[in-house]
Amino acid sequence: MREEVLGALGIEDLFARGSIRIDMQKCYGPQCDLCVKACPTSAIYWRGGRLIVQEEICIYCTACVLNCMIEGCIRVRRVRPDGRVEEYSSPRDVVCLQRAIAGLKAAEAVGRLFPSPEEFIKRYGPWPR
C-alpha cells in the first residue's frame, strides 16, 4: 500500500523501512505545531489532542525532527536500501547528516572533475614555488 500511495503522490521512497515515534509526554501540543507544518507529505496531524503519524505516507525525511524544539520528542529511525540504519531525535543529528551528505556529494563532484592528481595538474598546472 505504501508504494501505491507514495507513487500516486509522485514521491520516491528512499528507505527500505523506517519508523517514527513521538513522545507525547515531551510534546508541547497544538500550541507548538512545528512538526505538523514542516511535514512535506502531511503525514503528521492532530486528532483528539494527540499527534498522529500516518506511516503510509511518511517518507522519514526528518523535517519534523529538525523543526521540533524539544530534543528527543520525535525519534525517526530509517533503514537505507544498503542496510545502514540511521536514527535521529534532535536537530543536531539531522544537521550532522545533511553536512555528511553534502561532503560526500562534494567529494564525488571533485572526483568526476579530477579523477587523478595528474588531471588537476593538466588543467591548472603545478603549484607555484
Image (tube, helix red, strand yellow):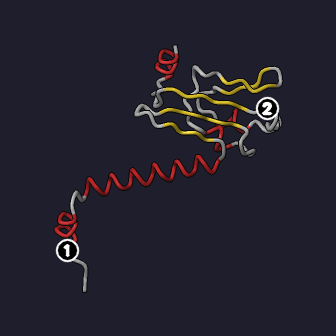
Asked if residue 90 lies left or right of residue 2, the reply is: right
Asked if residue 22 lies left or right of residue 85, the reply is: right
Question: In the structure shown, which secondary structural element does the residue marked by tag 1 occupy?
Answer: loop
Q: Position of residue 31 (x, y in %)?
A: 83, 36
Asked if residue 25 lies left or right of residue 93, the reply is: right
Mark 1 is on which residue type?
Gly
Q: Position of residue 61 (x, y in %)?
A: 56, 36
Circle 1 crowding by C-alpha within 10 Å: few under 14, some 14–19, many from 20: few
| View extreme (bottom): residue | 129
Question: In the structure shown, which secondary structural element does the residue marked by tag 2 occupy?
Answer: loop
The relative height of residue 75 versus residue 101 in the rendered view (above or below) is above
Q: Which residue is pictured at 45% across the width and 48% down the height?
A: 101
Residue placed most toward the observer, 84 or 58: 84
Mark 2 is on which residue type?
Met
Q: Which residue is mark 2?
A: 24
Instruction: Say which quarter of the image contains residue 77.
Output: top right
Q: Position of residue 107 (x, y in %)?
A: 35, 55
Q: Which residue is pictured at 67% across the width and 43% down the height?
A: 67
| View extreme (top): residue | 1
Q: Which residue is mark 1?
A: 125
Residue placed most toward the observer, 47 or 23: 23
The relative height of residue 102 versus residue 74 in the rendered view (above or below) is below
Instruction: Say which quarter of the image contains residue 38.
Output: top right
Count of numbered circles in the view = 2
Quarter of the C terminus within the rendering: bottom left
Residue placed most toward the observer, 85 or 71: 85
Q: Earlier in the sequence, mark 2 or mark 1?
A: 2
Q: Which residue is pictured at 48% across the width and 15% down the height?
A: 4
Spatial CA distance of label 2 from label 1 is: 60 Å
Disc marking residue 109: none
Q: Position of residue 120 (x, y in %)?
A: 22, 66
| Between marks 2 and 1 in the image, the one whose residue lies nearer the viewer | 2
